[in-house]
Amino acid sequence: MRFQKTTEYALRVMVFLWNHQGELYSVNRMHKILNIPYKYLGRVMHTLTGAGFLEVQQGKMGGYQINAQKSQIYLYEIIGAIEGLDSYERCVLGFPECSDENPCTLHKIWSNQQPGLKDMVYNVCLNDLGAEYNLKY
């Protein structure tokens, strides 16, 4: 299972801002720090703000920060806002018909791994990542 590029960027942004709570970052500043294309980052920030994860302050000294009302944000919430969670339910190879009765070549392996992956995205929050990994930017 691989996240879509937009989800990768969103997770990168959210972990970064979570580790820098209380600070404002403009799209231009984050684009340079996180090495995410400027226009792409702007769309990601718009989506994350619309989903309620971020607050934005306008003006020369403005920028984005984690929504102060959010004490915990889980990975499934971010993934759901960006790409949806249906990718955890469908065939890993993209076949429309894949089940125990009509399996693809990876069905058995994916079926065994799927619960652990789902458990991870539903139980890991940004606070866990911030505490676990002190990422350097």
Image (cartoon, rainbow, N blue to C red):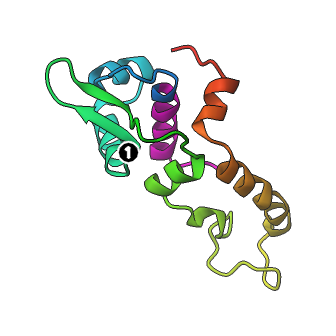
Magenta stretch encompasses residue 130: no
Tell me, yes or no, if residue 1 can be seen here.
no
* Residue drawn at 63 percent across, 18 percent down: 134
Q: Kindly identify the residue that appears in the image at 66 percent across and 53 percent down.
A: 122
Residue 1 lies, in percent from the top left, at: 67, 52
According to the picture, the residue beneath numbered tag 1 turns out to be 48
Q: Tell me the magenta residue range.
A: 1-16
Q: Residue at x 32, y 22 (%)?
A: 24
Majority secondary structure of magenta residues = helix
Q: Which quarter of the picture shows residue 22?
A: top left
Q: Position of residue 28 (x, y in %)?
A: 28, 22
Of residues 93 and 10, the one nearer the viewer is 10
On the question of residue 96 being in view, the answer is yes
User: Label 1: how many residues lie within 10 Å, few (<14), some (14-19) or many (20+)?
Assistant: many
* Residue 13 highlighted magenta (yes or no): yes
The residue nearer to you, when weighing 49 against 101, is 49
Looking at this view, name the residue that lies furthest to the left: 59
Q: Is residue 9 above or below residue 20?
A: below
Relative height, residue 106 to residue 43 (above, below): below
Percent coordinates x, y for residue 98 in the rendering: 72, 78
* Residue at the top extreme, as displayed: 136
Instruction: Give the quadrant of residue 58.
Output: top left
Disc 1 element: helix
Label 1 is placed on what type of residue?
Answer: Leu
Task: Describe residue 67's horizontal placement relative to residue 123 as left or right.
Answer: left
